Image (cartoon, rainbow, N blue to C red):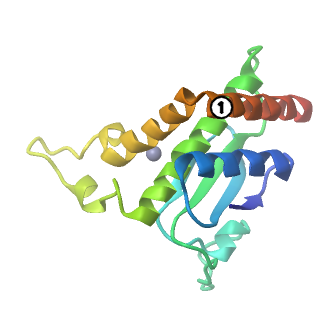
Amino acid sequence: MTRLYNHTKYPDQILKDILNFAARCAGVEGDVPVKITHCTHLRGGGEAHDNKPYLKTLKGRPTTSKDKRTLNCPRGWVGMHLPRTLGVTPQASLVAAEWFVDVAIHEMAHVRQYRTFKFYNPAYYGRVTKGGRRVAHDKRPCEVDANNTVDATRENRARDRRRQELAIELAIILEGTN
Ligand SMILES: [Zn+2]
């Protein structure tokens, strides 16, 4: 289940519904802390972290503080962002909402990786090839696995329907709030 820290103007319930759905699609076990903030980007986004979050971080306070208390939960948490304002195209809200649902599934897949120790190997990503490059981000096994999790959700009829329902519900809320 999601432990939501919502710093946006949008209501908790739809965000929780999306994040719980995403956790289910990604097969995450245990609670997942999620902090959601506004961003200026028109689609939003997210990132998964391989550790336990500081309480101050979740509550939106400066992390330079000496207070290093962490939330009591398994490792792995997610930061996500929703646009503060919508783009001007007719489908702007739906594009942003659908993207948000897909990113949620993608990031939850990373949390599953952190907790199961599969597909995630930091040593691999630090490795430099002969040409002096690191492994391209999107080709990393953890990214391929996370994207496959999103694809698997789309290929499952019932889940894809739910995925679209949630996106539409969020789009309506984005429209109504902006
Ligand atoms: Zn990723």
Q: What is the residue that sits farthest to the left in this orientation?
A: 130
Q: What is the residue that sits farthest to the right in this orientation?
A: 176
Q: Quadrant of residue 25?
A: top right
Residue 33 in view here: yes
Residue 41 in view here: no
Picture coordinates of residue 43, whole percent (x, y): 65, 32
Of 153 and 73, the residue lying toward us: 153
Q: Quadrant of residue 68?
A: bottom right
Q: Is residue 82 left or right of residue 133?
A: right
Residue identifier under label 1: 158
Q: Is residue 59 above or below residue 92?
A: below
Of 91 and 110, the residue lying toward us: 110
Picture coordinates of residue 85, whole percent (x, y): 78, 33
Q: Is residue 15 left or right of residue 67?
A: right
Picture coordinates of residue 44, whole percent (x, y): 65, 38
Q: For the point 64% across and 77% down, which residue is it?
A: 71
Picture coordinates of residue 26, whole percent (x, y): 53, 48
Q: What is the residue that sits farthest to the top in this orientation?
A: 90
Q: For the point 73% across and 31% down, which residue is it?
A: 167
Q: Quadrant of the C terminus?
A: top right
Mark 1, other Cα within 10 Å: few <14 / some 14–19 / many ≥20: few
Q: For the point 77% across and 57% down, which residue is it?
A: 6
